[in-house]
Image (cartoon, helix red, strand yellow):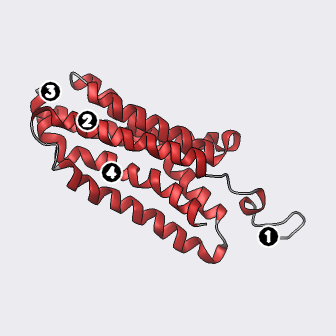
Amino acid sequence: MLLLVGMCSLPFFLDCLIPALMGPLASPIAQSLSLTRPELGAVFSANLAGQCLGLVTIPLAANRVGHRGIILWTTLGFGICQLLTTFVVDRDTLVASRFITGVFLGGALPSCVAAVTQGTPPARRGLATMLLFTAFGLGGAVAGFLGSFFVEGEQWRHAFSVTGAACLLAFVACWFWLREPPPEAQSPLKPGSNA
């Protein structure tokens, strides 16, 4: 149980850290790319729109690839997009990067929750879910602290490199240690039992 919760907590942690990191970096990004306030607002909106789209579309593939597959490939996806954000040159490339990153971020959350709730005993599901959302909140807290080190000039690009690399490390960890919940854990009702 602890390994499952730990692995699923990594994408949850990153899922809050990555969008929240834009807060402290907004000013240096705007100065670097000569963005106006409305244009900067479009960047934030693109990320949220992407998250909403990913939230309602990507989980539909869980029946084919499993929750483990969804978690793996969404984590890899937002890690690569985070790294690519390092190379944006204008508003359009930044908006596109944040939108696609958001799609992968939104797609990861439902499978993380589903894997944890299906793979833990009923008596411990509340605790397991609480730990997931604690990791989510921790990601937001770390974002403010981390962002403060990258607010000068073009250093904001390094912030995306660092967090992108962290995402890829999370992908590797999940590849080796995250397992799909066993079939008996996925179906609380045994065949022939009454609901």
Residue count near mark 3 (Cα–Cα under 10 Å), binned few <14, some 14–19, many ≥20: some
Specify the amino acid type for callout 1: Ala
Nearer-N-terminus badge (1/4): 4
Label 3 element class: helix
Specify the amino acid type for callout 2: Val
Nearer-N-terminus badge (3/4): 4
Q: Residue furthest right?
A: 192
Most foreground residue, 144 or 105: 144
Residue matched to label 3? 33
Residue count near mark 2 (Cα–Cα under 10 Å), binned few <14, some 14–19, many ≥20: many
Residue matched to label 2? 43
Per the model, the C-alpha gap separating discs 1 and 4 is 40 Å
Give the quadrant of the C terminus: bottom right
Nearer-N-terminus badge (2/3): 3
Q: Position of residue 194 (x, y in %)?
A: 84, 70
Quadrant housing residue 84? top left
Q: Position of residue 116 (x, y in %)?
A: 59, 61
Specify the amino acid type for callout 4: Leu
